[in-house]
Image (cartoon, rainbow, N blue to C red):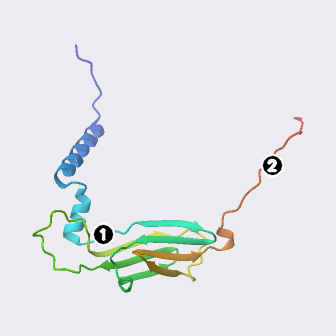
Amino acid sequence: MADLKKWEPFRELANIQKDMDDLFRRVFGSLTPTSLFRREVKGEWLPTLDLFMKGNELVVHADIPGVDPKDVDISVTGNMLTIRGERKADFEEKKEGYLYHETSFGGFERTITLPEGVDTAKVHASYNKGVLEIKMPAKAEALPRKVKVELEEGKKAA
């Protein structure tokens, strides 16, 4: 006699999603349905970002190779940093002759929430070898500080 198993509809949906992802991967390679739509229809792409503390500064690195720095707009509103710009194609778009085409062109926009204690009035941006670097000083109260742990030895239990 066969064992009875509880039907789990959400597991079935997860299996269907996995099967669809596998199908798209086989047909379109590394493109996902979302990236395929974004690249071909809307003409948008998203640069990758790194956000880290270096000394007493908050540093943001945005990978934007092929983007003219004149086509980049950086703004700070409250604690939100927005980077927007456009990568323009240097050629007429022709699909013939391509064996593989992954480069994305068009507009982009990234908005990130800045941590508390960053001095947004003193933002400095530079561009070198396709990497946009944005630096902001952190106020003293925002910097990490060490806390000493004291051991309570020798105290008697009352």
Tell me which residue sits at (15%, 63%) in the image: 99
The amino acid pointed to by label 1 is: Trp
Look at the picture and state if 52 lies above or below 151: below
Q: Please give the residue where the numbered disc 1 appears in the rendered image.
A: 45
Tag 1 or tag 2, which sits nearer the N-term?
1
In this figure, which residue is indicated by the disc labeled 2?
150
Residue beneath the point at 22% across and 71% down: 42
Type of the residue with mark 2: Glu
Q: Provide the secondary structure element on which disc 1 rests.
A: loop
Q: Residue 136: name its quadrant.
A: bottom right
Locate residue 135, reporting x and y percent: 54, 76
Q: Of residues 114 and 27, which is closer to you in this image?
A: 27
Q: Characterize the local packing of mark 2: few (<14), some (14-19) or many (20 or more) Cα atoms within 10 angstroms.
A: few
Q: Residue at x 21, y 54 (%)?
A: 29
Whether the residues at callouts 2 and 1 have beta carbons within 8 Å, the answer is no
Give residue 95's mark.
none
- In the image: residue 36, left or right of residue 116: left
Report the residue that reaches farthest toward the bottom. 70
13 is higher (above) or lower (below) than 59: above
